[in-house]
Amino acid sequence: MWKNTADDGPDVERVLELNGTIAEESWFDDDITPAMFKDELFSGSGPITIWINSPGGDCIAASQIYSMLMDYKGDVTVKIDGIAASAASVIAMAGTKVLMAPTALMMIHNPATAAFGDHEDMQKAIEMLNEVKESIINAYEIKTGLSRAKLSHLMDAETWMNAHKAIELGFSDAVLEDEKKSVVPDEAYAFSSKAVAVALMNKIVGKAKPEPAEPAKPEGRSVDELKERLATIKKYM
């Protein structure tokens, strides 16, 4: 169920956790089914975050959930905190943005089934599995941009990917980060020591009271001094 339905609103981002096996029907209410998911998904609108921790399961059921998310009008952020393996990796491909925890894993492989009968029945099963594989590659190709041949080889090899490998191959967009530990970039602390010194001096000068300036002294002697000197000279003439 959505974790924050009590705060529902047009701009509230709903958060849903997908933990468990993906199946067409749930026998013990511990599986993720398309019917259950549809009821939850379309119970509201706006951006959503889907947390995935699933070993996979039924590829047809996963295809239905994938299609619902692709058709959903709001932004879909997928966050993988444990594992998104097999069919669960297909659901993850529907995310507008896919983030993986540093410790999370993603796994892709060829689809499998059980078959019984003669060689004709076995051949039909092989043909069916080939088509299922091609349908899964469709989802991987849209998300990663890798060639179908490359994706086919990765599935043949049962490829396990940590967060960085998944980002390298295009299955994921980024690693989940601890926002509490985010720091301001070093550039924000860059400064000029000269600029700081000038600013400090300007502040000090602005606070200080200027002393009264002394009157300027005229160059040479004043008129009174010349008159006094002239009077003295006249006494001796």
Image (tube, grey):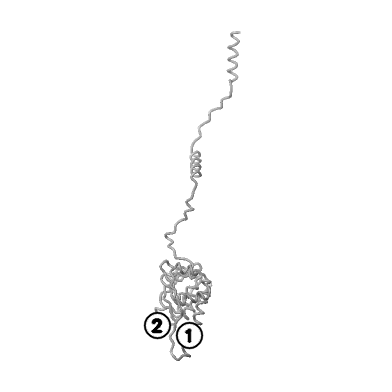
Q: Quadrant of the N terminus?
A: bottom left
Q: Position of residue 30 (x, y in %)?
A: 39, 78
Element type where label 1 sits in the image:
helix
Q: Amino acid at mark 1?
A: Ile
* Structural crowding at the residue carrying mark 1, measured as other residues with C-alpha within 10 Å and reported as few (<14), some (14–19) or many (≥20): some
Q: Residues within 10 Å of mark 2 (few under 14, many from 20)?
A: few
At horizontal 47% and vertical 54% (from top left) the residue drawn is 186
Of 63 and 28, which appears nearest the observer?
63
Closer to us: 125 or 208: 125
Specify which label sits upstream in the sequence, 2 or 1: 2
* Residue 1 visible from this viewpoint: no
Residue 27 disc label: 2
Task: Please identify the quadrant where the C terminus is shown.
Answer: top right
Would you say residue 234 is visible in this rendering?
Answer: yes
For disc 1, the marked residue is: 126
The residue closer to the viewer here, 136 or 206, is 136
In the displayed structure, 41 sits above or below 216; it is below
Q: Position of residue 105 (x, y in %)?
A: 42, 71
Residue 155 screen position, x and y as percent: 47, 76
**Percent position of residue 153, x then y:** 48, 76
Residue in the picture at 53% in, 28% down: 214
Q: Amino acid at mark 2?
A: Trp
Q: How many marks on residues? A: 2
